[in-house]
Structure formats: C-alpha cells, structure tokens
Amino acid sequence: MRLEPLLRAHVPALTAAAASGPRDSYAFTWVPASDAEAVTYIEEALKLHAAGKVLPFATIDAATGRVVGSTRYLNVEFWAWPAGNPLQRGEELPDVVEIGATWLAPAAQRTPINTEAKLLMLTQAFEVWRVHRVSLMTDARNMRSRNAIRRLGAKFDGVLRAARVAVDGVIRDTAAFSIVEAEWPEVKAGLQAKLR
C-alpha cells in the first residue's frame, strides 16, 4: 500500500471505495456515501490541514492502484519546553501526534493494508519526527476498532467520558490508546512480523 496526500481529485475514488460493499463496519466512523459527501469530507480535511491540525491521506492499494480508504495524523502537538531542555528536539518537530479517522473499503478490511499503513505512519512519527507518543482513539462502543488498535501493539489508556459528538449524533465516550517512544522498537518488530 501507499499513502498519498488527500486531494479534491480523490472524490470519485473515495466514493467508489466506500460504496464497494456493505457499510455495516462504518457505524462509528464518518465515511462518505456520495460524491457530495466526499467533497465535504475532503474540504473539511483540507481546511484542518491548512490550519496545521491534521495531515490527511488517501490509502492506496499498490497492487491495483485503487483508493481503498483514508487515514490521518490528527491533534499534532508542539509542547512548550523550558529553554535548553534536552528533550526538545526542535520547534519544527511535533512532540505528540494521533493517528485516526481511518477507514477502509470492505474488501481491504482484515488485509495487511491497515497494518502496513500503521507501520508506515508510526515509523514516520517515531523515527523521523521522534515524537514522544502516538495516540489512537476510537468510539468506546467500537469493539472492532478497539481490538484492531490493540493488535497494533498500542496500550489501553482508558475511556474519556463524554469526549465528543459521535457520528450517530450521540455524545461519545472515547477509548484512548497510545504507543510511547520506549515501546516503539517492540511494536515495530511485532508489526513487521505480522506483515511477514
């Protein structure tokens, strides 16, 4: 798989990916169901990107060249460090990021695509940006997503109660997971083993 920066040109491909099978796995995630919704989805992502809040991608199946979903870096944090602190790596490098807003077409679910995408994104976060933590969040009701996050090697941090509005309009509790930099070598080895 490969990740491409999400662009307006991805509208028809995102719509096709989302419409390529049953939508029952999208109960807790906003996945565009039409070109109009895909336009809104991408425009919102690009607006947040311009504000420095997200880095959105289209997920591409390298074997077919088709868009099979989308994912993002979210909640990029730059901490205020005391002057001269050795943990400060430079003002241009984030301290913490979240990976989320991930969805895949039904045919791409339960394939190596998500594992490979997360390995790529985590490698960027820990080895290039050298972040201290990567967060992964999901609707607390979404056991499928919670189990997938655990399989990546992330640790369960707890549930943030009444954290935000859910895709179905209720107030959502959020299950919070994370990987910290000291855990990254073991998590990376586990992901590489899964892909072998």
Image (tube, rainbow, N blue to C red):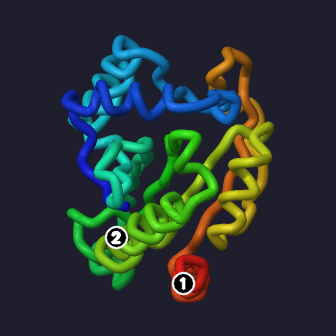
Q: Is residue 111 above or below residue 24?
A: below
Image location of residue 13, percent across then percent down: 32, 32
Rendered residue at 56%/58% (across/down): 135
Q: Quadrant of the C terminus?
A: bottom right
Q: Is residue 80 visible?
A: no
Query: Which residue is labeled 2 in the image?
Result: 124
Image location of residue 89, percent across then percent down: 29, 76
Image location of residue 59, percent across then percent down: 38, 49
Query: Which residue is labeled 1 in the image?
Result: 196
Amino acid type assigned to the residue bearing label 1 in the image: Arg
**Viewer-proximal residue, 85 or 102?**
102
What crowding class fits label 1: few (fewer than 14 Cα within 10 Å), some (14-19), or many (20 or more)?
Answer: few
Q: Secondary structure at mark 2?
A: helix
Q: Is residue 156 above or below residue 132?
A: above
**Viewer-proximal residue, 44 or 79?**
44
Left or right side of 196 for 120: left
Q: Is residue 75 visible?
A: yes
What crowding class fits label 2: few (fewer than 14 Cα within 10 Å), some (14-19), or many (20 or more)?
Answer: few
Q: Quadrant of the N terminus?
A: bottom left
Amino acid type assigned to the residue bearing label 2 in the image: Gln
Dot in front, 1 or 2: 1
Image location of residue 183, percent across then percent down: 59, 82
Q: Secondary structure at mark 1?
A: loop
Which quadrant would residue 3 be assigned to in this image?
bottom left
Question: Residue extending furthest top?
Answer: 36
Left or right side of 191 for 32: left
